[in-house]
Amino acid sequence: MNLQMLYYFIQVAKEQSITKAATKLFISQPALSKQIKKLEGVLGFLVLRRSSKGIELTERGEALFQDLEPLFSDVHRAIEKHMDHETIHLGCAPTESSYYLPAHYRRLHSANVIIPDVLDNDKDLIPLLFDTKLDAAIIQDVPSYKGLFSHFLFEDQFEIAVPIDHQLAKQSKVSIDECLAETLILPLSSTPLHQRVMTLIEQRKVTPKKVMETSWHNVVAFTAGGYGISFIPGIMANYIELRGVRFLPIVDYTPTRNLYLFSVNRSILDVLVYALSA
């Protein structure tokens, strides 16, 4: 058992909803449900049950929540009390700076966090950590790195963005091969998503009509302009409304990415984990 599993339980208990808690925690609903099941397996009893109104705590689940919630609140207050208020420099990719971090700006501001570096390829942030140009960074699909402290943040599922007048826009869902056969608008070749899509094309032996490269900032705009379709992180698809674009789920193969927080300093990592837990 780990503290994150207990924290997930507390959030579900507060929200009285797996869906709402998953949205707040920036993880998928199945992933959160899996964590709750794991917790119940470790504890040896059910903490939640389904009702006509959704979900509710069992008697033992309620007792557990009443015991744990004050403890986690005390931990958060203690971290805040002893927080070093020197400026913390946090690096990330454009999608995280635009669609993940804004929900946490109040606490980030309280912790004196600034975001000086936003790079299309977040792995380019790692050298900046070792050069002490950054205190922390959010990096995808790298669970650990020698010499750095890390913490799992959330899992993100990609969706497909298509122009509203595109043939795929008439469908409620799409297959991965349907997507790969179209004109693809991808971020730059140095980015993890570009490399993953090109690997998929090779593995599934599908030939796209065309592959276009542009910066992350232009991917959705080019899609809206009718140039092609694009793979968009779920945190981005959930928080933007763009005229001329429709977002569709991929049914047979859903690309995902895992986001991790890194720092050379354990105390800084703890401060940021707290700031990003709201």
Image: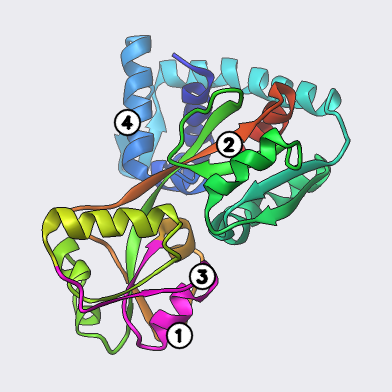
**Mark 1 or mark 2, which is nearer to you?**
2
Q: Which residue is mark 2?
A: 261
User: Nearer the N terminus, badge 1 or badge 2?
Assistant: 1
Mark 4 Cα shell of 10 Å, populated few (<14), some (14-19), many (≥20): few
**Mark 4 or mark 1, which is nearer to you?**
1
Q: Quadrant of the N terminus?
A: top left
Residue drawn 71% across the image and 20% down it: 75
Q: Which residue is mark 4?
A: 34
- Residue type at mark 3? Ser
Q: CA distance from mark 2 to mark 4?
A: 22 Å
Q: Quadrant of residue 126?
A: top right
Q: Quadrant of the C terminus?
A: top right
Q: CA distance from mark 2 to mark 3?
A: 23 Å
Instruction: Left or right? Give the position of 85 relative to 230.
Output: right
Tell me: residue 77, above or below residue 96.
Answer: above
Q: Secondary structure at mark 2?
A: strand
Q: Which residue is mark 3?
A: 215
Instruction: Left or right? Give the position of 230 relative to 173.
Output: right
Q: Secondary structure at mark 4?
A: helix
Q: Which residues are magenta?
A: 207-232
Q: Which residue is mark 1?
A: 243
User: Nearer the N terminus, badge 4 or badge 1?
Assistant: 4
Residue 176 or residue 277, whichever sits in front = 176
Mark 3 Cα shell of 10 Å, populated few (<14), some (14-19), many (≥20): some
Q: CA distance from mark 3 to mark 1?
A: 20 Å
User: Nearer the N terminus, badge 2 or badge 4?
Assistant: 4
Q: Secondary structure at mark 3?
A: loop
- Residue type at mark 1? Arg
Q: Are marks 4 and 1 in contact (CB under 8 Å)?
A: no
